[in-house]
Image (cartoon, grey):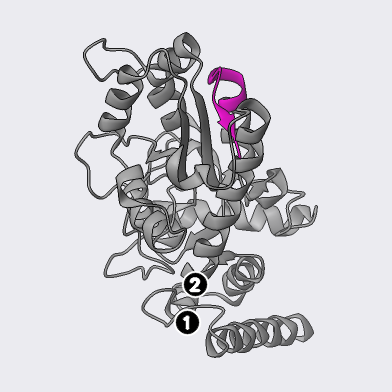
């Protein structure tokens, strides 16, 4: 009885705190991040306790912070360019640098999150529109300047497993010479920086290992302690009982809701794509690195955050 009272007060405290965050505009309106209806998905008090504990450490990045982080990471890129290009000055951000993004799975996929940032570069970072280009046009620009090394910033919001970056750098071929971005960089000594806002450690390690010549800058690195699938994470703090209860709950939800269970192989996997298990959302959507129960949307399950884009 005493434990049930503790669980009840903990759940109510979580709701009050998140309600305060919303009132102070640290969290968005309900139809953008709906913790009330999401918590109502969980029927038992034990499951609600686990869900409440997850929300305590859930990372939400509002649009105002996205804009600030974008300006910050571009500034970091400037420090790198100044170390490799003796002609680099502050004005070079606007007259000696090209901006693009990592190509998504489809060449014309307008739902890819990379398309969000060209507008932000123009409006929030004051980058001239003629300096911002599609991935295909970037390759053409590099072909036109084989003997003249170019400075390039590739913007993004999030890197999860790093698979897409690896594929784009090493396999995607555009232009008349059908060369990859990595081949252009190594052959012609272009200075290319990949500048996502947030990077999961899995993606960080893959990019460092497999994307030779690509310089990486970021604002925040998510180490293993940010994964729900790690017992010693910020969510479970080494507590075997709570960790095991969460994993069992996730299995039950996946079975009941028909969520893919592929050990991270499916983009809507119960553990998140690549078994990353992150609890993270941006104002414009939630990455597939997060377990599907955060964004699963059916008649019997309400999402915490809808996935408006993919990566």
Vertical position of residue 207 compared to residue 170: above or below: below
Vertical position of residue 112 compared to residue 5: above or below: above
Label 1 belongs to which residue? 36
Label 2 belongs to which residue? 42
Residue 271 percent across, percent down from the top left = 50, 46
Neighbor class of circle 2 (other Cα within 10 Å; few <14, some 14-19, many 20+) is: some
- The answer to whether one can see residue 258 in this image is no
- The answer to whether one can see residue 116 in this image is yes
Residue 20 percent across, percent down from the top left = 60, 89
Residue 28 percent across, percent down from the top left = 46, 79
Neighbor class of circle 1 (other Cα within 10 Å; few <14, some 14-19, many 20+) is: some
Q: Does dot 1 land on a helix, a strand or a loop?
A: helix
Task: Confirm whether the magenta stretch covers residue 208.
Answer: yes
The magenta region covers: 207-217
- In front: 106, or 191? 191
- In front: 308, or 42? 308
Residue 173 in the figure: left or right of residue 90: left
Q: Does dot 2 land on a helix, a strand or a loop?
A: loop
Q: Quadrant of the N terminus?
A: bottom right
Residue 139 in the figure: left or right of residue 79: left
Q: In front: mark 1 or mark 2? A: 1
- In front: 41, or 91? 91
Kindly indicate whether the residue at mark 2 contacts the one at mark 1 (C-beta within 8 angstroms).
Answer: no
Residue at 37% over, 57% down: 122
Q: Earlier in the sequence, mark 1 or mark 2?
A: 1
Task: Confirm whether the magenta stretch covers residue 251.
Answer: no
């Amino acid at each position: 009885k005493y434990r049930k009272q503790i669980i009840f007060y903990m759940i109510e405290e979580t709701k009050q705190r998140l309600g305060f965050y919303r009132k102070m505009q640290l969290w968005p309106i309900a139809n953008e991040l709906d913790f009330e209806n999401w918590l109502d998905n969980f029927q038992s008090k034990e499951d609600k306790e686990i869900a409440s504990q997850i929300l305590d450490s859930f990372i939400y990045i509002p649009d105002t912070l996205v804009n600030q982080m974008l300006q910050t990471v571009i500034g970091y890129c400037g420090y790198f360019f100044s170390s490799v290009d003796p002609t680099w000055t502050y004005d070079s951000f606007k007259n000696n640098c090209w901006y693009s993004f990592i190509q998504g799975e489809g060449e014309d996929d307008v739902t890819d999150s990379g398309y969000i940032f060209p507008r932000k570069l123009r409006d929030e970072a004051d980058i001239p529109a003629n300096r911002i280009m599609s991935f295909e046009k970037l390759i053409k620009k590099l072909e036109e300047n084989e003997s003249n090394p170019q400075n390039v910033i590739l913007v993004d919001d999030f890197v999860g497993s790093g698979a897409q970056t690896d594929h784009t750098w090493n396999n995607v071929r555009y232009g008349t010479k059908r060369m990859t971005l990595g081949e252009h960089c190594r052959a012609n000594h272009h200075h290319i920086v990949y500048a996502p806002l947030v990077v999961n450690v899995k993606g960080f390690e893959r990019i460092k290992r497999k994307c030779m010549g690509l310089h990486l800058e970021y604002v925040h690195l998510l180490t293993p302690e940010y994964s729900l699938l790690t017992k010693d994470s910020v969510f479970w703090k080494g507590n075997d009982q709570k960790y095991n209860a969460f994993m069992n709950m996730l299995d039950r939800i996946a079975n009941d809701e028909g969520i893919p269970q592929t050990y991270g192989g499916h983009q809507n996997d119960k553990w998140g794509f690549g078994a990353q298990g992150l609890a993270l959302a941006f104002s414009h959507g939630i990455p597939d690195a997060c377990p599907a129960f955060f964004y699963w949307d059916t008649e019997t399950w309400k999402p915490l955050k809808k996935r408006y884009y993919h990566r």
